[in-house]
Image: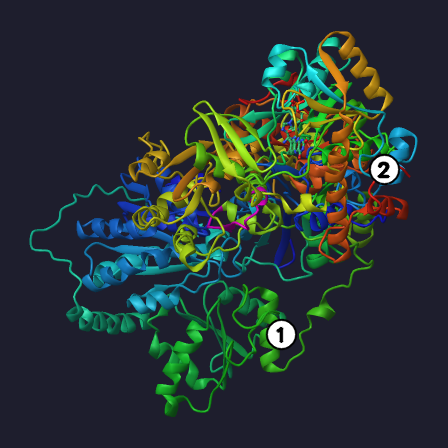
Amino acid sequence: MEQSKMPLRLRQEVMESGNCARCGLCVGLCPYIKTMNERIAFIHDCNREDGTCYRVCPRTPTNLSDLDKQVFGKERADHGLGNYLEILYARSLNKDLAQAGQYGGVVSTLAAYMVESGESQAAVLTKRQNNSPPTPCLARNREEVLSCSGSNYSASPTLSILNAGVRSGLEKLTIVGRPCQILGLRKMQALTERSEHNMSAKKVDFLIGLFCFWSLETEIYTYLRGKTGSARLLRMDIPQNYGVVTTENGEIQIPIDELRAFIRPTCQSCFDPTSEFADVSVGSTEYDPEWSTLIIRSTRGQEIVNKVCNAGHLETKPYPEERLPLLLNAVINKKKRVLESLSNGKGYEYLELSSDYTQGIEEGGVGR
Amino acid sequence: MTAKVLNIIVTGVGGQGNVLASQVIATAAVDSGYFVSVGETFGASQRGGSVTSHIRVSKVSAYGPLIPQGEADFILGFEPLETLRTFRDYGNSSTQVIMNVRPNYPLGVLLNEDQYPDIPVLTGNLRVQSQKLWALEATNLAVDVGVPVGTNMVMTGAFAGVQFLPISFLAYETVLKGMFAGEILDLNLAAFQVGVKAVS
Amino acid sequence: MSFMSLQVNEPGRSVLMTGNEAITRGAIEAGLSFAASYPGSPTSEILAHLGRLANEHNLYAEWSVNEKVAIEEAAAASFAGLRSLCIVKQNGLNVALDSLVSIAISGIKAGMVLVVGDDPGAHSSTNEEDSRLLSKVVHIPIFEPSTPEEAKQMTLAAYELSENLKLPVTLRCVTRISHASGNVTLGELQNVNKQAIFAKKDRYVTNAALHQLQEVKLAKIRQIADTLPFNTYKGPQNAKTVIIASGPSALYAPEAVNALGLDNEVGVLKLGMTWPLPEKFLLEHMKHAERVIFIEEIESFNEDNVMALAAQHISEIYPLEFYGQKSGHVTGPKGPGVGEMDPDKVKQSIARVLGVENNQAAEKPSLKLETPDVPVREMAFCAGCPHRASFWAMKSAVALDGRNAVVLGDIGCYSLALRRTGWALPQTMHAMGSSAGIANGLGKLERFGFKQPVIAVVGDSTFFHSTIPALVNARYTRANFLLVVLDNETTAMTGHQPHPGMSKNAMGEIVEGLQIEEVVKGLKLPVVIQDPYDVKGTTEVVYKLLQSEGTKVLVLSQACALVAAKASTRPRVYIDQEQCIGDSCGCNRFCSATFTCPATIWDPKKGKALIDEVVCNRCQVCVSLCPQGAIKVEGGANLDR
Ligand SMILES: Cc1cc2nc3c(=O)[nH]c(=O)nc-3n(C[C@H](O)[C@H](O)[C@H](O)COP(=O)(O)OP(=O)(O)OC[C@H]3O[C@@H](n4cnc5c(N)ncnc54)[C@H](O)[C@@H]3O)c2cc1C
């Protein structure tokens, strides 16, 4: 990696060029990068040559095959979904978590298990704030995990709390994050030659990734306030072709085109809609809102899911054969769109993709 | 005193109390029957800038408040860098210097853009260039007396002690007694004495 | 500084006084009753002294809200038969000018003296302004002292002249008079017990018809000027070269002439009254001269006026050559009129005119060694200054907001924010309160596509001085901006004078201070009060306020560090060098090299940060900003936060 004025490059190439994914991992490494209202900015020019901020950013050059080897010990066979061991349907057996969860409450159930069992000291989650941007949360018990259930569709930089949490002495952390957040954490874990104080990701030992095809601009909350008035917003979902917000006064449907206006442009340059580097990834089934899709990727993921199932908190069932191509197509199509925008010079290129990877995508993903 | 006018420069950084020191010296000189002019630059005094007083003492007449370049007979430097700066502009080979060796770093040095001269190098330079240099740990001496802000009185005491101006210690002490009272007076007198001793 | 000498009642004794003390003493010897001022360097100390002496000498001294009010009050006292004094700096005269013009027309009763401090070289000012031009516009006479001794004598003379002519009189001091010290011969202290009365028959009205009377008064003064002891000539009779100088230049000139060995050839004519001119006196000396050299500070005021006089009398004095700023001979390195005069510039200028060698270089024994590099010492916020925290918070909020907010600076210590110590955040700076006026303007440009938020930053004293009308305007015209008041509970810039927000007045009496938020609330504008030492909280508040529409006010309240430090029992702050990891931290030496508090320095031996405890004012702001948590407070205490 070229070592010149990395913080400056982060500012110019990522932040000021609109490519920031807002993962939040660079916030709190130093006194210069801060966040407010989901925006991340340098408050002062940092003229250092080297910069952890730049190295760990999910939007700076990243070699996917190196990362595959680092996390899973091997390159991927599936260019759609990445490395994985198993793909399932899953749902929570805990009523409250199932009820509050976005779909099957799987994420919350896993996170709750981690903090309750002592596997983790805390989980880094994202907490809904009615009609305002959500806030990061270091959940240390089941109650706190429960209070963070459900999806917020903006790109909230919730990893910003990680560095502060680790500095306060926390270890063994669970992280729930969007694909970009998972990627950033893995990049930080990859900085093995560094034993610096700010290598927070090294204290993270369970990564739950969400599916995420795109996120929305913060302005969505102002927009939603316009729709819901003063009613408390309880839940938001985006089924196939419209949005639904649930408030204390009932449901309001939102035309998909209106929502699309809030999609963050940088999400169109993202190759990873399923959190390919997480220990487990969770998404919708696009079919049955009682269940979530659960991709077990690493042995660590397998181990935890087994424990949670054995403890009676989670049930799983096989992923319906006939639905797998639908998921794969959606993922491959997104990746193809990104490749296309790159080849006509519109996209933002940050991934170092070997020809194997690009070819794999062109050929539709699986089976090579 | 044979010269028509003696030129003394008191120099330091805002907040070090060097204006007060120059006032004590100048008042003692007036009370001892001299014509004195003091030119003071203390606009920046509260904001960390250089603060310099030109004191001109004459038996004959009142002089202008500024000393021509190269014509300082004595430099009382509260801070090494400022002492060096003043010597560079106003000193000559017969200039005598008392310098407090404790540095106060300017912004450019804090910003890591400028280099603060090495204290031994700086001291050596002044020692060679001047007629005589007294390098004092004035701030530490003041801290020892229990008044870090009393550095100015230690320096004043040192100036009185070297007897560059034929003014009695009593004249200085009378000035201090007119300015302060009670415990503060005692501390200032103590610091003054420490300064006198430091050069004797 | 030698305040005690002001109280010595030993007529004839010579004591050391600053120019400001000499004027104070002169005013009291003249039987002063009423003084009003707004602080401004270099003249601030005069009113401060008068305030302390008020009781003893049965006089009234006031720090007024601004100079316009101050001069109106001084005029009022004069109307009522009391000798009065108004003290301003150059910029202050601009503020007072509108009223002064009228007061000079209406005339006054008891002696009224206006002290104006000009600041050649702008030691403590935003500009170099020659106030003599304004006094000329106003049609009032100008005394210009060249020593503290003269400053006192002229103060006395100014009262006499003012009372005789029923006209205010200007005493123009430059920094090298006000802040210089010298021997002053004491006179009798007065303790007048005057009865104030506004006589039933008296009228003081501004009226164009009175212009003629003003001209008559000036003509009278012109005659008086010729006999004044302050206009002097020293040098050989019928010298071919005459230097016309005023102010401290009148001392630099003879010293330079002497150094150049020209005592027998060059004469020095000192002008003590620079407007109107002592015409006969001048002409008399110009007649024998072949060349005249003008030396004065800032504008070519004497030069222009004397040359006009000479032109009028050309047949009597021809041939005569004029050298000065106009000819380019009298100048410092930055050009004629720019920067302050000093003995070296004067010497070089004279040598340049006369074509003699400036023997200075030869005279100065050359230094034996090369001097090591001497880095400049920039002005910076003091250790613990709340402004540093305030500007860091504003800078953070502006960056986080991301819409290129425009920050508008104003006059006070916080003007330093234009420099590196304040990360050059403000983009404009003009006169007292101007930031709020400019914010009013920018705050209405939305209709022209202007989308940047606007922040005007004023101090507490500036708020009262001239920001309030702009706020009224903002409320009326619905301007879109945030006014940040840096409330450090004093007029810090000029030496901690009280202002209407404080519970003490110039004479040390306890009064009811006016709270800034009271004023803002009275205007029905939203106001938030915040402690700037809480940098994170302040950043959030500024950010939030920037997101809202309309005019809003944020008061950042924290006492000036220099005042607070004096009264402080705050615990010691230190750096735990075990915990500071130096350059391997991502902070890039935040405390010393970015936040640049003079108390947090770099310890090159250990490669870690260090606190200079002699300099530290123990504000604890750095404690909250160190990303490594390495800055500690003894006993773990944490101020009120
Ligand atoms: C911005 C965004 C876009 C998404 N897009 C898709 C998609 O296109 N297709 C799809 O199948 N699934 C998508 N998801 C995932 C989906 O909404 C559910 O989060 C997922 O199915 C898990 O459901 P659950 O009931 O198991 O989770 P829950 O038990 O409800 O837990 C949800 C978890 O998500 C975390 N969270 C909420 N908001 C955020 C956020 N903004 N950033 C990071 N973490 C957050 C919470 O902390 C909580 O732990 C998206 C999620 C987000 C946040």
Q: Quadrant of residue C399?
A: top right
Tell me if residue B80 can be seen: no
Total marks in image: 2
Q: Which residue is mark 2?
A: A366
Q: Secondary structure at mark 2?
A: loop
Q: Amino acid at mark 1?
A: Gly
B86 to A253, vertically: above or below: below
Q: Amino acid at mark 2?
A: Val
Of all chains, the one bearing label 1 is C
Near-viewer residue (A111 or C301): A111
Q: Is residue C409 magenta?
A: yes
Left or right side of C480 for B167: right
Of all chains, the one bearing label 2 is A
Q: Secondary structure at mark 1?
A: loop
Confirm or reject: label 2 Cβ below 8 Å from ligand 1. no
Left or right side of C462 for A300: right
Tell me if residue C485 can be seen: yes
Near-viewer residue (A314 or A288): A288
Magenta part of the chain: C398-412
Residue at the front extreme of this rendering? A322
Q: Which mark is residue A111?
A: none
Q: Which mark is residue C261?
A: 1
A86 to A315, vertically: above or below: below
Where does the image place residue C490, in percent across and percent down from the top left?
Answer: 44, 38
Q: For the residues marked 1 and 2, what is the alpha-carbon distance in whole angstroms?
A: 100 Å
